[in-house]
Image (spheres, coloured by chain):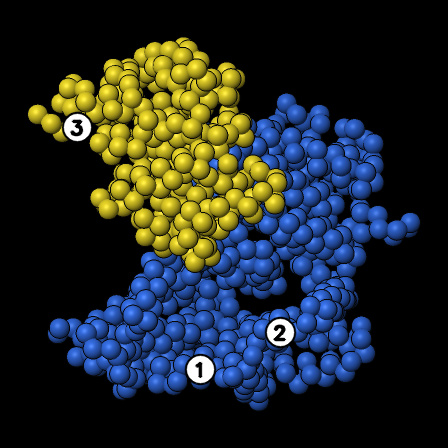
Amino acid sequence: MTTRPVLELRRVSAHYGPIQVLREVSLQIQPGEIVCLLGGNASGKTTTLKTILGYVVPTHGDVVFDGQRVNGLPTQRLVALGLSMVPENRRLFQRMTVRENLELGCYLRMDRAEIAADLDRVFTLFPRMADRIDQRAGTLSGGEQQMVAVARALMARPKVLLMDEPSMGLAPVLVEQNFEIIRQVNQQGTTILVVEQNANMALSIADRGYVLQTGAIVLAGSARELLDDPQMRAAYLGEM
Amino acid sequence: MADQIVPTDAPVGAGAGLLPAQGVSARRAVTLGLVAGVVAVFVSANGMVSEFAERDVIAELSLGVLWVLMIPLIVGSLAGQAPAVLQGFAAPRPGWRNPAGGALAGLLAAVVMAAFILLIDAVNVRDVLINVRPDLVETEPRLLTFGQGVGAGVALVLAVYAALGALGGALHLLPDRWRRAVVAGVVWLIVMGVLSSLVSQVLRGIQSTTNIWTAPLADALYQGGALTAPAAAVVFVVGAGLYLLLTRPRRTPARVRVRRLPDRSQRIVRVATLAVALLLLGLLPQVLGPFLSDVLNFAGIFLLMALGLNIVVGFAGLLDLGYVAFFAVGAYTAAVLTSPQSSLGVGWIFWAAIPFVVLAAAVAGLLVGTPVLRMRGDYLAIVTLGFGEIARLLFLSDWLKPIFGGAQGIIRVGDVPLAPGVEAGGAQPRLFFYVVFTFVLLAAYISYALQDSRIGRAWMAMREDELVAETMGVNIVAAKLWAFVIGAILAGFGGALFAAKVGSVFPHSFEVIVSITVLVLIIVGGIASVPGVVVGALILVGLPEILREFEEYRFLLYGALLIFMMVRRPEGFIPNTRRVTELHEQELQQDAWLRAKETE
């Protein structure tokens, strides 16, 4: 690991009132990687994402994005710097059309020609979306909605794409398809941080992974190492 | 089922496997009839019938009696109607059940009413219900019993209500289009009858301003403020005929025909329409005369506020119940700066005060907006409600009395100068109209421009999902504050115009009810829809001013209208298309599902 990480958490702690939810979490994401953040319920996965996106301000430690210390910056500044998120359960603007959803994805961008190019790029990635462009997002199937959610986040042309529980609420077939999409997006040059409970699935596409437990990183390593780790297998991969 | 007259007609020509639709239900007719009876008794007991009896609408028929008789007619039509069917389901065939259901409902309404008549004849209820006046049953004109004694009256009530109910139900025997035409005719009849003074004033006004020969028409239509019987027949036929003409099959709507024209011609049509509309609006105060112009100005000021609140509530989704505060700030700023008798005593002209009105309203918007940034929904509504009261109490307080005059307010607010030597104030409603109109036009333009702008999209996203909107890069703080500030400025304009129109400002003009009224007219007109808000303001603020009889019952009618709208048409008179989809989501999804089935 010689390159400078594009996103780095340096011993970040965070509190909700008196309750500490993150304990000195450190992680690094190199450009071009897929990194997954694993953990069970209430392990601090979502809080980690919220801290990266500026919804939660760390009480200790630093969030460094693209060489710049960003803790405490408002969310829209972080989005402008190149962070973008696919929220848990997709959360599309259900009553707006697919097009309007995509337009909101590039809300902060002013470069019209580039936006049009990105729209084409999204259509090549998800050919079915071109037919659905003027349909209301709420009427799409779950799989299609997931595509729109990813497309919406890509329209911001992020340096790092954050994905919160992409397998949540999807049928197994769609989960697989979804992870295939993540891999494709990554191959086109987007760095991705995936937060997941489905460790098997996430590790199958990730380069590296971190495991969170009650707010602290307990394991870290390459996807291979984690898949082979006995402790990991026992706790998260469903083996006795 | 035992409670149904109908063993539901089998679906006609519908795809096999679909459920048959329900027919007219006796239970429904009974329920509706009893409710209608209670409503009829209610409007009699609260004095509406007696109050409106002074006003003849059609020949000898007074508004009071018409008011009561409409109830069995409407309920008959509701009871005689088969419940709405989903697309793809066959509607039951019309038949004798429609009028029978209507008659049943009408009869039950009559039973309730008859019981009421017998009660007030036997017992003196006036100690408790002071509005149960003797002219209902005991003394002439015996409004409820059609001028008869109690015995004959009750029999007549039963017969008439049942007949009207049957008539209402029988409407459903007509094909859809013809039924609507009849309803249109009746609506025309009632509107022309109730608005007799307005219509004759307009007809006379047209003659005096444009020399088109219209005044004799007014004399032909009305006698003593009521439509004459032949005129009523003509109005009904014209109303129904117009409806049929405008909805004839294979008629291409004007909008579509215009869209088919080449771009250049389209632009010409649009400019021409705008020019004609502006010309007509320019002539309006001359045609309407001073009284109606004044009413229009009053409605215009409320419209200005409504357009502003529409930005806050409709576009940005922030429920602000203290909106009157900004109206008050605008009014007081204009008053302090233009009145020679205010604490400042500068006596500026109106236009010089306007920049300060904008500034003061914007500051007030920020003051209210900043502390509530983190609040949503109910909490926001309650807190802003408090802010509205705080503003009023500040203007009323002894503490600020040296500036705002406390309960004495500020008098001698300056008129609006239009040209050297020409000033428009409350005493020149026809000139003042142009001032109000300019501001309303500005507000409407701002609304439309914002709706399609970046900030408009940000508001829309924020209304749907604040958190995700933020993730898209929307600056929530800025978006909320902009909504509050722009809304406040428009209300500030309204306040400044109000001060100039009335010529004085007092704290009691800025009570909570102003906020509520503005909110109601947005909701009834169509939230987030500019044309809807315009219609809402004209109907809810303009009409009660013209129909003075209604004044006492204004809020009762607002309440009834609001409930009716929430149940039957929550998107308002002229809805914003997106709102329709929000409110009728399920129906639309069902339709889409069925359409998909059909094409499979």
Quadrant where the N terminus of chain B is found in the figure: bottom left
Residue count near mark 3 (Cα–Cα under 10 Å), binned few <14, some 14–19, many ≥20: some
Identify residue type, mark 3.
Leu
Viewer can see residue B562: no
The chain letter for the residue carrying disc 1 is B
View extreme (right): residue: B420
Q: CA distance from mark 2 to mark 3?
A: 63 Å
Choose mark 3 or mark 1, whichever is in front: 3
Give whichever of B58, B534 is nearer the camera.
B534
User: In the drawing, does residue B292 fall left or right of residue B521?
Assistant: right
Identify residue type, mark 2.
Arg
User: In the drawing, does residue B446 fall left or right of residue B580?
Assistant: right
| Image hue for chain B | blue
SS at mark 1 in the image: helix
Q: Position of residue B203 (x, y in %)?
A: 71, 76
Q: Which residue is the site of mark 2? A: B260
Give whichever of B247, B38 is nearer the camera.
B247
Q: Which residue is the site of mark 1? A: B177
Q: CA distance from mark 3 to mark 1?
A: 66 Å
Task: Give the residue displayed 39% in from the left and 54% down from the top.
Answer: A128
Q: Looking at the picture, does residue A59 appear above or below residue B237?
A: above
Residue count near mark 2 (Cα–Cα under 10 Å), binned few <14, some 14–19, many ≥20: few
Residue count near mark 1 (Cα–Cα under 10 Å), binned few <14, some 14–19, many ≥20: some
Q: Which circle marks residue A237 in the picture?
A: 3
Question: Do the residues at pointers 2 and 1 share their chain?
Answer: yes
Are the residues tagged 2 and 1 within 8 Å (C-beta)? no
The chain letter for the residue carrying disc 2 is B
The chain coloured yellow is A
Identify residue type, mark 1.
Arg
Q: Quadrant of residue B531?
A: bottom right
